[in-house]
Structure formats: C-alpha cells, structure tokens
Amino acid sequence: MTEKISCTELYQKLFHYYGPQGWWPADSDFQMLISAILVQRTNWKNVALALGNLGKNVTAGELIQMEEAELAEKIRPSGFYRMKAKKIRAWLHWFQKYDFQIKEVQKVDQAVLRKELLAIHGIGEETADAMMLYAFDKPGFIADNYAIRLFHRIGFDIPKTYYAFKAKVEDLFPHDLEMHQEFHALIVEHGKQYCKKTPLCESCPLLSHCWTGNEIR
Ligand code: SF4
C-alpha cells in the first residue's frame, strides 16, 4: 500500500536522497540566462559546447553587437541555432532596457517580470520561469516534462495547462527561493536517474509513496 505524499515531503525525500544540487549548472548568472534559451529542445552537453564557443566571459554588450549570423554559427552545437540566435537577440534587446544589469531586473515585481519575459520572441513559460528562478531570484515552480511525469506517476492530480499546474504546486509549497531552486533540480535529477521514460521503480527512493511504482511491481 502506498502513502500519499505532499509536495514538501516529496522535496524532502528527494533532497535527503540526492543532496543539494546547487543549480543552475552555468558559470555565471549571464551564462545561465543565455543557456535557458540554448537548452530549448536539446541536452546540456550541446549547450556547454555552444557556451564554450561564446566564451566564458562574454558580456551582453558584446553579444548584442555580434552579427546574428556569427552568433548563430557560435551556438550551432545547441541545434535550431538560427532560431535560437534570433531569440537570444530579442531577449538581449529586452535586457538592454535594464542596462544589462541583473540586479535591476531583480527589482521588478514577479508578475510584471514574467509578463515581460513572455512577451519576448521565443521565450515560453518554461524558459521564463527558469530565468526568473535561477537568475532573477523569483521563487516559482517549473512545470516541465520531468515534473509532469513524476507528479503524474506519484498520483498528483495534474491540471491541464502549464500555468495551472505551476500555480497548484506553488500553493502547496513554501514560497522560498532556495527550496524552489533545489526542487526543480532534484526533480530533473530524479527523472534522469530513476523516473525515466521507462522507470526504474524497484530501487527508486520514492517507491513506497508511488502508486505507479507499486502497480508495476
Ligand atoms: S517508483 Fe517508479 S514511477 Fe514512481 S517515482 Fe520512482 S521511478 Fe518514478
């Protein structure tokens, strides 16, 4: 028989098992922001290659001066590179409004900032929420595919839209920046290690709380 698990208990179990993840895996907040676009529809290995081509210390001012074709060539390893170059340039033009100062963006109200990000070409909800959480210090839940898969499997009633799922979890979880940063990273880690497309339930640390795992056994 499985026990129903709350969002906070889920976080605690994952944190206890995997330890702190210290995300996002980038060298600086600016690299984090660029990589949130680069990681769309690819994996981190390809993102790291693209970031390497851009250079560890590249600045927003340098990137906005770069021809779009040159930028696209540098980020080619991340795939969809022409589209991503356009998105990065659109995002940079928005960031320029804040003089490329992350601290200035952090002062913006959370709801207003999310609306601004979503109005930028190529910035969807997942990308906006990742930027908000890991660079702009705004706590929130990222309702990505890893989260949908895990929450569905443990028996959470998932609303139909991205935003409704995000809002539901946020209502049930502390409004705490570090906890949200860790929660997302832990869910991704768990999705890679155990709760894969074909899950490894036998040795999963959540087995006693997961009806799917117990059905499969
Ligand atoms: S028991 Fe299986 S389905 Fe449930 S969380 Fe673990 S890996 Fe995923």
Image (cartoon, rainbow, N blue to C red):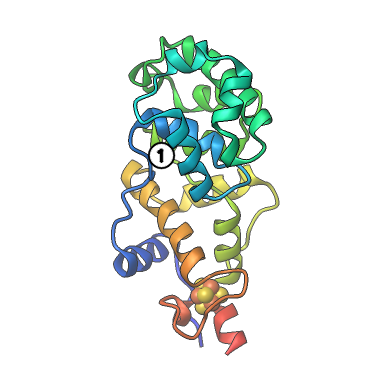
Q: Going by the image, does 98 lie left or right of 176?
A: right
Residue 14 point in image, percent of width and height: 37, 66
The location of residue 135, given as percent across then percent down, is: 39, 32
Q: Which residue is mark 1?
A: 139
Q: Residue at x 47, y 80 (%)?
A: 207
Residue 89: percent from left, percent from top: 58, 19
Relative depth, front residue between 60 and 175: 60
Is residue 3 something one can see in this rendering?
no
The yes-or-no answer for disc 1 within 8 Å of ligand 1 is no
- In the picture, measured across the screen, residue 7 lies left or right of residue 78, that is left
Residue 87 lies left or right of residue 48; in this view the side is right
What crowding class fits label 1: few (fewer than 14 Cα within 10 Å), some (14-19), or many (20 or more)?
many
Looking at the image, can residue 98 be seen?
Answer: yes
Q: Amino acid at mark 1?
A: Pro
| Relative vertical location of residue 100 with respect to residue 201 in this rendering, above or below | above
Residue that sits furthest to the right in the current view: 160
155 versus 207 height, above or below:
above
Residue at the spot 52% in from the left edge and 81% down from the top edge:
201
| Front-lying residue, 201 or 171 | 201
Q: Position of residue 179 (x, y in %)?
A: 34, 49
Residue name at image x 34 percent, y 41 percent: 177
Q: Please determine whether, in this image, residue 126 is positioned above or below residue 116.
A: below
Disc 1 secondary structure class: loop
Q: How many marks?
A: 1
Pick the quarter of the image with the C terminus: bottom right
